[in-house]
Amino acid sequence: MRTQKLGSVKKRRPCPETAAAAPAAAFRLLETYANLAKKGEHLLGNLLDGTPPRQWAHYPEADAIDQSGGYQWFYHSHSPADREVTSEHGHIHLFARKPLWGRRLRLGSEGAFAMLCGNPQENPETRHLVGLGFDAKGIPISLFTVNSWVTGDLMLGADLTLELLQSINLNTGHADIDTVIESVVRLCAPELQELLRRRDEVLRRHQGPDKLFDQSLELLSEVHIDLDKKLATVAIM
């Protein structure tokens, strides 16, 4: 993914429910990695079958589908030449499936976001929520958003995206990865707010009717995360 400079965005104060979820998310995250360390396992070991990932391949091949039908994700990595200066090993793309948002596109906020995006007429089955970058140790190091041509679907407005992320409950058969995804999005609620505000700012500045399919616009926003610092902050609360 290519990193670009983005303007600062005014942060919103987390709601009490979001703030209360952070300690529980921190505990689950630490517990997951502690259990993996005891077993001498890597977070992505089973997913990759113990072999280096093939560039651009989806893991799992047909995506990890939540049993409730609400979410799906896949892991993949780009070529070293495409990463530029980064410690990213690969990343997860997380999506919401139509049952979660199909009837909610009539919301005023979704209408405004569709207008911001140029009122696309496509009707995909998924909406891309966020990307999570991982280092070689299997530790999340970034959150990012990409333009719609990258994932082949569309996005949702910031408010609905945040709501779907904060209420996420995954059951894809990849329990440790599901827990890490859930924990990170709950632990990093302020970063996600900033990420989506930056995304919308970039979309607002970009001119042209087909901005979602302009291949010169790939990475919309990115926030680097330091989980050690984040966990220390949560522990002090």
Image (spheres, helix red, strand yellow):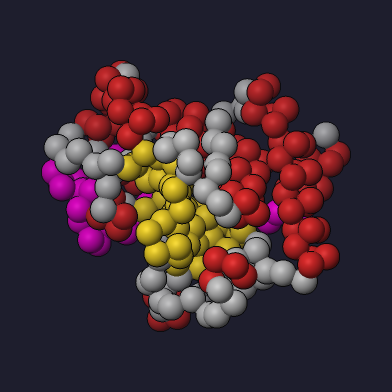
- State whether residue 13 is above or below residue 173: above
- State whether residue 185 is above or below residue 42: above
User: Where residue 11 appears, x then y in whole percent?
Assistant: 56, 33
Quadrant that contains the N terminus: bottom left
User: Where residue 101 appears, x then y in whole percent?
Assistant: 36, 29
Tell me the residue at 55%/80% (across/down).
51
- How many numbered marks appear? 0
> Which quadrant of the structure image shows residue 123?
top left
Observer-nearest of 32 and 208: 32
Tell me the residue at 56%/33% (across/down).
166
> Which quadrant of the structure image shows residue 199?
top left
Q: Is residue 175 visible?
A: yes
Residue lying farthest to the right in this orientation: 236
Q: Is residue 205 visible?
A: no
Query: Which range is magenta?
Result: 204-228
Tell me the residue at 18%/34% (across/down).
119
> Which quadrant of the structure image shows residue 24?
top right
User: Where residue 30 appears, x then y in whole percent?
Assistant: 78, 51
Observer-nearest of 70 and 220: 70
Tell me the residue at 65%/54% (across/down).
176
Q: Is-magenta flag for residue 6?
A: no
Q: Is-magenta flag for residue 213?
A: yes
Observer-nearest of 211 and 178: 178
Left or right: 44 in relation to 7: right
Left or right: 131 in relation to 113: right
- State whether residue 66 is above or below residue 10: below
Quadrant that contains the C terminus: top right
Observer-nearest of 67 and 154: 67
